[in-house]
Amino acid sequence: MIYRFLSLDHFRDQLVPPSPVGAKPGPTPLTESPDLQALLQVPHWPAPPENATAFASSTSAEKSHYRLLQSQSNYTVGNMLLVSLEARDRHGQPKHYGGDFLRAKLHSPELKASVAGTVEDHKNGTYTLTFPLLWAGAVQVSVRLIHSSETVALLRRIRDSHPSTITFRGYFVDPSQGSKEEVTECNVHPVSGPTCQYVDPGTGEHWFCAKPQHHSCNELVYHSSGIYKNVLTSAEKVFFSGRNSHFSSDAAQVALIFIPLCSHRAATDQIIPGSVPIIQVLPSHQLAVATSPLLPCHPGLALTNPSGFYYKDVWVSLGCSSRTFPTPDLALSCLRGKIVHMIGDSTLRQWWEFLLAFIPSVKRIDLHVTYHAGPLLAVEPVQGLVLRWRAHGIPLRTAKSKMADIHYLANELNAFAGGPDMVVVFTLGAHFTTFPVDVYVRRVHGIRQAVAQLLARSPQTTVVIKSANTGYKSVYLSDWLSLQLDNILRAMFADMRVAIVDAWAMTSCHYLPDNIHPGKVVVQNEVHTFLSYVCPGK
């Protein structure tokens, strides 16, 4: 489902120097920049009345319903299909306010074809769903209630009222004391009691750890995930019940707080029934399937809505001439002589893993680091290909890793000389849903500055951004929280010469079950879209 509430027509660079080492927290770019203040409005979402907090008054997928808005005698490729949805509460009463988080798609299972729909929230309990008809054949509508408006309000309140909903661990080690170590709580904000404060000299980012009793602050050596905080009351947990409401961590060592399943009154990620029949779409002027435009893919292109669709399990871009790379030789030919830097989370690491498995001559070099945090390196020496992946820096949910191996994304970008043979691709979002929005805005603003400087000193560098995946439904890692950050990311880079791979659309409408780490066919299509920007020529 595609939601867009606000887009920025322009966003000018405002270069703010980082705070020096040891500096105390002072005024942030967030409070000084009107543009950053505007970005805080990007996540706007309709809110329910303040007194609408009871579970019984929340939107029920089972009681809600959708129908055709305008029935036609014939439907052809190129037409639009309009659907009206009426939300009802658990008593079956019509809702009179909006804010539900819906996901809809039009699909043809036999053709392995699908496209995400667009939602228009009328803020009165009704919604219009719009689907482009992009291929001929039998198509059907599918609509899911991911979160009710009441659940969204709860997510927003928890996000905005807690400095974090997760903790991290810092491991302090003194080599002179052998293997003895102390473990304390760490986070992006000060923790209780005496605190060690760390200021990154390159970005000005702050990190805090509880001061250990027997070690100095300078002896912080390792980092790992901690625990998710208990932020829900017993009455609130029911709002997150339903299939897939629990989640798995990127690292097995993370302590989890699972949301109990209550299948008898499920609330999260539920199918909404409808009366839209299977529709036969006819070819238009002998055109059976929409095709990509002839425009080659290149950084700086604005994403279309929708950005593309699946047909026979292949993603077809509607914004530029996307390519496929069905053989290892074609992929390797595209990447010949390239140095590819991937910086982000585990969803981007899937790209690195896919290319490593897909191209037999690419070999991994073991750097003896924690796999979840990296850095990871693979090379193809004959063709001169270098593939790197590393995590985007703290905060990072990961197994125990050396702090020295975890670099801030902006620092990595500032260290690149760039050039026509360098490709930089990054993603940022999934590890920031456990913090207020301003933490993310501040981080992405620093990354934008670094990208602007990289492109200024080396305009031929290819920069690609991978958007967020869908697949999370918990209070900590909800798709609604991810969508908020994803919209900020897109707005921040809207006027820059970067390419965006719309992984949100590609994961949200595929037939595979929702998973933050999607199956091979989805990852393959994401990588093919990425390569279409690296090698736009036919």
Image (cartoon, rainbow, N blue to C red):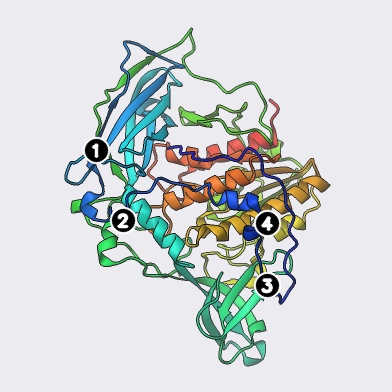
Relative placement, left or right, of 288 versus 392 is left
Q: Is residue 454 visible?
A: yes
Residue under the point 63% across and 72% down: 403
In front of the other: 158 or 337? 158
Helix, strand or loop at label 3? It is strand
Q: Are marks 1 and 2 in contact (CB under 8 Å)?
A: no
Tag 4 near tag 1, CB within 8 Å? no
Q: Position of residue 43 (x, y in %)?
A: 49, 48
In what element is the residue under mark 2? helix
Residue at 24% x, 55% y is 54
Tell me how far mark 1 sits from mark 2, CA to CA: 18 Å
Q: Which residue is the site of mark 4?
A: 446
Q: Which numbered marker is on residue 64?
A: 1
Q: Marks 4 and 3: CB-CB under 8 Å?
A: no
Q: Where does residue 480 sit, x and y in percent of width and height?
A: 43, 49
In the image, 252 versus 412, the foreground residue is: 412
Q: Estimate the x, y position of residue 286 in percent, counting from the top left.
A: 48, 8
At mark 4, the secondary structure is helix
- The kind of residue on which mark 2 rests is Phe
Image quarter of the C terminus: top right
Q: Residues within 10 Å of mark 2 (few under 14, many from 20)?
A: many
Is 73 positioned to the left or the right of 157 in the image?
Answer: left
